Amino acid sequence: MNDFVALSMMALIVGGLVTGIIWLSQILGPKSTSAIKEEPFETGERPFKIMRSHVPVKFYLVALLFVVFDVELTYLFPWGIVFRQLGWSAFISMMLFLSLLFLTLVYAWKKGVLSWK
């Protein structure tokens, strides 16, 4: 029960700090706006054109694939370190996990996410 109390206290303190910092930034922060401050900032120069178009969905799909395979490596590295101590159940579980990720890659390939035209 002590661990739960400590975790709850930490969550309350961190939540209070975040709320306090956001509240202070709204109270103490600058409030004046002008036309120049409302413009997008691009390397100190005035923007020559403000883009109002959407980013193609392909970029988001590639980013999602990156996240999926990045998470795979996050689980695969520690598993590989303690592979011999875990036994067959962990091996079967990891093969199931890797096969699902492989199916994700096959699905993305079939949908044409990986082709850049």
Image (tube, helix red, strand yellow):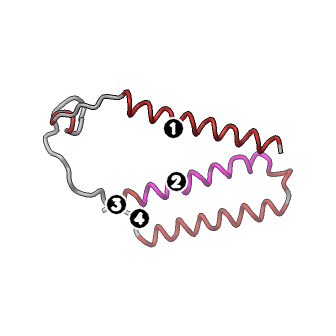
* Kind of residue at badge 2: Val
* Residue located 64% across and 40% down the image: 12
Give the magenta-colored segment's residue range.
Answer: 61-82
Q: Nearer the viewer, residue 14 or 108?
A: 14
Secondary structure state at the residue bearing disc 1: helix
Residue occupied by mark 1: 19
Q: Which mark is residue 31?
A: none
* Residue located 50% across and 71% down the image: 107
Q: Nearer the viewer, mark 2 or mark 4?
A: 2
Q: Position of residue 60 (x, y in %)?
A: 40, 58
Q: Residue furthest front?
A: 27
Tell me which label, 2 or 3, sits earlier in the chain.
2
Tell me which label, 1 or 4, sits earlier in the chain.
1
Residue occupied by mark 3: 116
Q: Position of residue 15 (x, y in %)?
A: 58, 40
* Kind of residue at badge 3: Trp
The Cα–Cα distance between marks 1 and 4, rounded to whole angstroms, is 41 Å
The Cα–Cα distance between marks 3 and 4, rounded to whole angstroms, is 8 Å
In the image, residue 35 sits, relative to residue 95, either above or below, namely above
* Kind of residue at badge 1: Thr
| Tags 3 and 4 touching, CB below 8 Å | no
Label 2 crowd (10 A; few <14 / some 14-19 / many >=20): few
Residue occupied by mark 2: 67
Q: Nearer the viewer, mark 3 or mark 1?
A: 1
In the image, residue 8 sits, relative to residue 34, either above or below, namely below
Q: Is residue 66 left or right of residue 43?
A: right
Residue occupied by mark 4: 113
In the image, residue 110 sits, relative to residue 55, either above or below, namely below
The Cα–Cα distance between marks 2 and 4, rounded to whole angstroms, is 14 Å
Does the magenta-highlighted stretch encompass residue 71? yes
